Image (cartoon, rainbow, N blue to C red):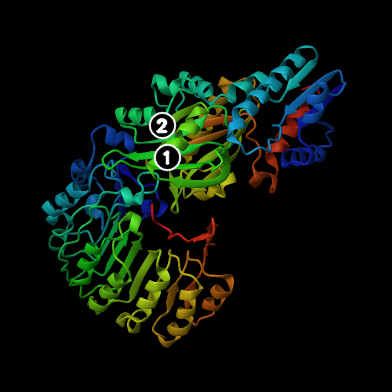
């Protein structure tokens, strides 16, 4: 079992990343052995934040055994407030190849959980989400399925403050469209939401228009539309509509396709605005190409 | 009379910054253009020469010409070696050792024989032979060896020319080939110096076949150490047994070569543990001991994610040009100038 070498984690004993490298996986380690090893770790009793990286061949085996083992040992995990499953880099597995699992039973098993982050969306299922304490839900992926979005739409998360979704693209799992997100924002009931992230989309302009007309605009303090294909069209909408919402203190538009001029105008809005890392569209054989940040 | 000679190309950063370093030490260097050598096969007249050989400039982006250019360069180095036998000549790096490092397969085998950790080459006869490997055979081998992600590197390449990364998900058949190589519509095969991702079988197979035709080594693709969301490897410049420079090469993609707009980072920022730095320094020293004819080399080193175990990716007898150094202290060429000055003084 490997521990991450991130410096701050060496200091912060309440957070740890566990993962298997290729050699360990080849020697027979995998999702079925991971949780047992984590529980045996001397760090485990002190952890508040548990990060699970590559469970061994994440492109071959799902993390279902990891989730099931947490559920089966729920009492032993009762001190974990933040959980991240699938925190692995590009070199370990393409994000769209990470085989996720079914989280249906996790909600009841971890009532103390405050933050859940999931990376990868292949075979991802959230089931019926009902959780009294969850404050943040983040899904990082190359393409989010309609089923998962609908689970979120119906979720009972009264304390949810942060919802960050990487919408992604059709080739990598997003089988919805603008209406899917419109329905999500219309029907979802998150009374405590202060951070809304609808990001990493190849229809970022269209989704921006939907977000700006959503009921959450009056309650959020952070609007995250980063990592997508937002152009000046979406930028103009933001310029027009965001000033009507003084509750928004931060607008994250980093990694998009805004012109310098538009980025400057948006940067001058009376709030914290991140317009860094703007990309330039590529032209090939007369076609214009813009890519969301995380798709592969 | 003793004379220091730089054999290279005029106006290149290599030439300019070595000359600057020499000037600071009051060291006279005679510059000889590769074109001049090619025309008359002669170096300046002096009783004894100390020669540094920089690489000739290659302007072609055709990968079809890569092996021919490399073979031509090897012949030039062989000629220099023969020429040196007729005169009193000392080299910074002797041509025969430089030639050895131009063959990635042979270099890696030699390092491995010496027990040094390297990025492992896929061990099969089709991968070890010359130019017989095809895309189909490679996928078969990857499946058989359960090695689902590999690097493919032309044996005689330099930089990222033709270097490709391939991964494959056997259950779904999904594949991804990352390469700067491109088969153009007119059938030409070029190095675009721009990393692309190919995921359709009908794109991957023809391109991969063409890359493999160049005669390639296939290596295991290790997950590299990470820093702030980037993966990185290291370029070490080792001279006279001393680790003169260590640079992090950060990348969001699999290939860290700095010509691909990747991000260089001083290793101090990586905050590597002292024992890891010590392991790297020892590995560099041992690598150089295997090639006593080299006084200067660039060594690319990977740190495995998690264990931080260093492995040599490759060695380059002309890997001394580091922009982060020449625009700062110019210490690498400064050290070379000092070696040359000491030789001039008879030390």
Spatial CA span between label 1 and label 2 = 8 Å
Q: Nearer the viewer, residue A15 or B296?
A: B296
Query: In the image, A10: left or right of B12?
Result: left
Could you say which is closer to the camera, residue B68 or residue A221? B68
Dot 2: what SS?
helix
Circle 1 is placed at which residue position? B204
Whether B65 is drawn above or below A158: the answer is above
Crowding at mark 2 (Cα within 10 Å: few <14, some 14-19, many 20+): some
A142 versus B121 height, above or below: below
Question: Badge 2 sits on which subunit?
Answer: B
**Side of B240 where B235 appears, left or right:** left
The N terminus of chain B - image quarter: top right
Q: Where is residue B226? Give x, y as percent.
A: 43, 47
- Identify the residue at image location x=32%, y=82%: A219
Task: Tell me, for residue A161, which label it has, or none.
Answer: none
Q: Is residue B304 above or below residue B80?
A: below
Q: Are marks 1 and 2 in contact (CB under 8 Å)?
A: yes
Q: Position of residue A114 (x, y in %)?
A: 24, 66
Total numbered circles:
2
SS type, badge 1: helix
Pointer 2: what residue? B135
């Amino acid at each position: 079992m490997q521990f991450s070498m991130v410096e701050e984690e060496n200091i912060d004993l309440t957070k740890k990343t566990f993962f298997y490298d290729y050699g360990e996986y080849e020697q027979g380690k995998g999702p079925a052995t991971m949780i047992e090893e984590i529980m045996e770790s001397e760090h485990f009793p002190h952890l508040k934040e548990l990060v699970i990286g590559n469970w061994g061949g994440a492109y071959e085996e799902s993390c279902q055994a990891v989730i099931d083992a947490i559920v089966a040992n729920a009492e032993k995990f009762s001190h974990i407030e933040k959980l991240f499953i699938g925190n692995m880099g590009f070199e370990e597995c393409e994000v769209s190849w990470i085989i996720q699992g079914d989280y249906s039973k996790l909600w009841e098993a971890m009532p103390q959980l405050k933050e859940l982050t999931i990376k990868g969306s292949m075979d991802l299922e959230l089931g019926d989400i009902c959780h009294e304490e969850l404050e943040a839900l983040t899904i990082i992926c190359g393409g989010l399925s309609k089923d998962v979005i609908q689970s979120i739409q119906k979720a009972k998360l009264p304390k949810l403050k942060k919802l960050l979704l990487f919408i992604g693209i059709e080739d990598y799992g997003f089988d919805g469209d603008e209406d899917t997100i419109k329905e999500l924002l219309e029907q979802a009931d998150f009374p405590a939401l202060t951070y809304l992230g609808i990001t990493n989309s190849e229809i970022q302009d269209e989704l921006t228009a939907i977000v700006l007309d959503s009921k959450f605009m009056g309650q959020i303090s952070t609007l995250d539309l980063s990592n997508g294909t937002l152009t000046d069209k979406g930028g103009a909408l933001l310029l027009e509509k965001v000033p009507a919402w003084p509750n928004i203190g931060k607008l994250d538009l980093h990694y998009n396709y805004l012109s310098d001029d538009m980025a400057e105008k948006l940067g001058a809005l009376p709030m914290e605005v991140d317009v860094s890392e703007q990309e330039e569209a590529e032209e090939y054989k007369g076609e214009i190409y813009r890519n969301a940040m995380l798709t592969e | 009379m003793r004379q220091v000679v730089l054999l290279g190309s005029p106006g290149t950063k290599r030439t300019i910054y070595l000359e600057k370093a020499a000037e600071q030490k009051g060291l006279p260097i005679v510059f000889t253009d590769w074109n001049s050598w090619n025309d008359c096969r002669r170096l300046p007249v002096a009783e004894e020469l100390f020669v540094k050989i920089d690489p000739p400039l290659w302007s072609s982006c055709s990968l079809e010409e890569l092996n021919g250019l490399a073979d031509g360069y090897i012949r030039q180095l062989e000629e220099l070696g023969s020429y040196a036998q007729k005169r009193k000549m000392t080299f910074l790096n002797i041509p025969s050792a430089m030639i050895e490092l131009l063959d990635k397969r042979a270099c890696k085998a030699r390092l491995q024989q010496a027990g040094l950790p390297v990025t492992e080459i896929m061990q099969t006869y089709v991968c070890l032979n010359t130019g017989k490997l095809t895309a189909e055979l490679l996928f078969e081998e990857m499946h058989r060896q359960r090695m689902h992600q590999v690097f493919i590197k032309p044996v005689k390449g330099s930089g990222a020319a033709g270097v490709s990364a391939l991964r494959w998900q056997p259950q779904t058949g999904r594949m991804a080939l990352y390469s700067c190589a491109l088969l153009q519509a007119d059938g030409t095969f070029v190095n675009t110096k721009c990393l692309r991702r190919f995921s359709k079988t009908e794109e991957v197979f023809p391109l991969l076949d063409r890359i493999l035709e160049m005669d390639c080594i296939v290596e295991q693709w290790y997950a590299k150490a990470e820093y702030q969301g980037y993966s990185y490897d290291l370029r070490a410049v080792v001279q006279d047994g001393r680790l003169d420079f260590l640079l992090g090469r950060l990348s969001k993609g699999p290939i860290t070569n700095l010509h691909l707009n990747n991000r260089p980072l001083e290793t101090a920022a990586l905050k590597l543990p002292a024992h890891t730095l010590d392991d790297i320094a020892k590995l560099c020293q041992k690598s150089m001991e295997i090639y006593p004819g080299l006084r200067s080399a660039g060594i690319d080193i990977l740190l495995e994610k998690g264990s931080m175990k260093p492995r040599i990716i490759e060695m380059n007898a002309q890997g001394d040009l580091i922009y982060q150094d020449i625009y700062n202290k110019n210490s690498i060429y400064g050290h070379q100038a000092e070696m040359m000055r000491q030789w001039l003084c008879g030390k």
